Structure formats: structure tokens, C-alpha cells
Amino acid sequence: EDQVTQSPEALRLQEGESSSLNCSYTVSGLRGLFWYRQDPGKGPEFLFTLYSAGEEKEKERLKATLTKKKSFLHITAPKPEDSATYLCAVSPGGSEKLVFGKGTKLTVNP
Amino acid sequence: DAGVIQSPRHEVTEMGQEVTLRCKPISGHNSLFWYRQTMMRGLELLIYFNNNVPIDDSGMPEDRFSAKMPNASFSTLKIQPSEPRDSAVYFCASSLRQGPTYEQYFGPGTRLTVT
């Protein structure tokens, strides 16, 4: 069964305090791994797609990496506006569907 | 460009009533997805279409749920009869299946409350 586990469930950081969010997955033939950001009352917002182990992508203070069984979302010097729930999802081979983890709720205090 | 449009944004109904949720995907996208989000289960796929054809409906909870996509710019998700356990946020997403890239873009969601 395709499954995604994210940790921690919640993370509180001080502004400027860098950290990483974790995503572990089991999937039948990984087609792609996705990171989304979700603000309260809104739909998930696409951040990154990673396709193969060793791949890295960056956007502003965010950097996503992929290994064979895990992905990491590293946040460098976060700001309060980075506060949100970050969702990790995998797309199994042969399908376009996304299987989501339950997310990490990030709070960045000023 | 307009994003994915969903209506209504909020729906409150009584148990046993029919509920219809609507979605307009991003123009030019050829895949459309319906997801449901709850605190307990997170975000789960219900059904998806490619070129208006249902491809995977294995996530549809039971026969009370049905989805249609009569054309490339419109889809509906219907619940009949509705039950309190159907209370959730329902998201529609669309993507352009083209080569290796196929990220999904989500609408703002419909918050459904069944009393």
C-alpha cells in the first residue's frame, strides 16, 4: 500500500532558526514526489516536484531533497510568513493520483 | 490566468439532502481530481478524470457519491443522500498531463457541513 508519513506533526521555530521537515514514503514505483504548502482555509499550493533520488530544488528559503525512501524540506532562516502546513505527496507509477501525508504544521515566531 | 474555481465555498445541509459541488478546472488542463480533507484522514483522492473520462474512482466512499465531467471545463461531485460523516472540505484540482511534469493545482475548496 502506498503510504506517506510526515514528521514532526507540528514544529515551532523562532524567526531565523533553520530546520528540516521529514517525509518518509513507501510507494509502488515512484513517479514523483511533491511538496505543497497549505494556509488555513485555502487549498494546497504547489511548491516542488522531485523525480529521482539525489535531486534537489530550491525556492527562496525552501530547499527540497529526495532519497530512495525519504524527502526533506529544509527551511533556511524562516520568517513568520513561512508559517503554514507543509504537505508531502507521492504519485505511484502508472497513476496520476497523489497520496498525501498528514502534513507538518510550521509556526515561525517573530 | 484564473485558477481552479469551486462553488459553493460553504455548504450546510441536513442529513438526507442531496449536495452538489462544482468545479471549473484551469483552462487547457486535461486532468481533474476530487479530494476530501478531514482532520482524521488528511487529504484523500476520491476520483480523477483524464480527458473527461473517469480513470480511478477507487477512493469514492460508497454509492452515495458520484462524479461527472460532461466537458473539459466543468465537473460535479454529488452526494445523495448526505450523512454527517460526509462533513469535510472537498477540493478540486487540475493538471496538464504533458511529458514528465504534471503538478496539480488546487481550488479553494468547498467546506461541507451535514447536520
Image: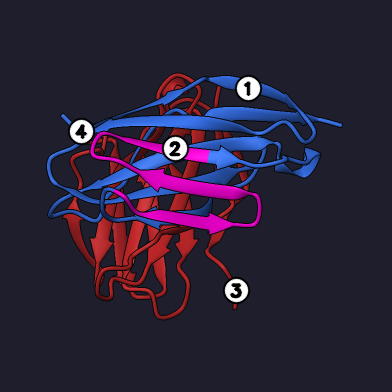
Chain colours: A blue, B red
Any part of residue B103 in sight = yes
Residue A45, x across and y down, in percent: 55, 53
Residue type of the residue flagged with mark 1: Leu
Residue B114, x across and y down, in percent: 52, 27
Label 2 vs label 1, nearer the camera = 2
On the same chain, marks 4 and 2? The answer is yes
Residue type of the residue flagged with mark 2: Phe
* Residue at the disc numbered 1: A11
Residue type of the residue flagged with mark 4: Asp
Which chain does the numbered disc 1 sit on?
A
Q: Residues within 10 Å of mark 2 (few under 14, many from 20)?
A: some
* Residue at the disc numbered 4: A2
Residue type of the residue flagged with mark 3: Ala
Q: Secondary structure at mark 4?
A: loop
Which chain does the numbered disc 3 sit on?
B
Q: Residues within 10 Å of mark 1 (few under 14, many from 20)?
A: some
Q: Secondary structure at mark 3?
A: loop
Q: Nearer the viewer, residue B18 or A85?
A: A85
At 67% across and 37% down in the image, what residue appears? A40
At 72% across and 40% down in the image, what residue appears? A78
Which chain does the numbered disc 2 sit on?
A
Label 3 vs label 4, nearer the camera = 4
Residue B56, x across and y down, in percent: 18, 50
* Residue at the disc numbered 3: B2
Q: Is residue A107 magenta?
A: no
Q: Secondary structure at mark 1?
A: strand
Q: CA distance from mark 1 to mark 3?
A: 33 Å
Q: Is residue A59 magenta?
A: yes
Label 4 vs label 1, nearer the camera = 1
Q: Quadrant of the C terminus of chain B?
A: top right
Q: Which residues are magenta?
A: A54-73
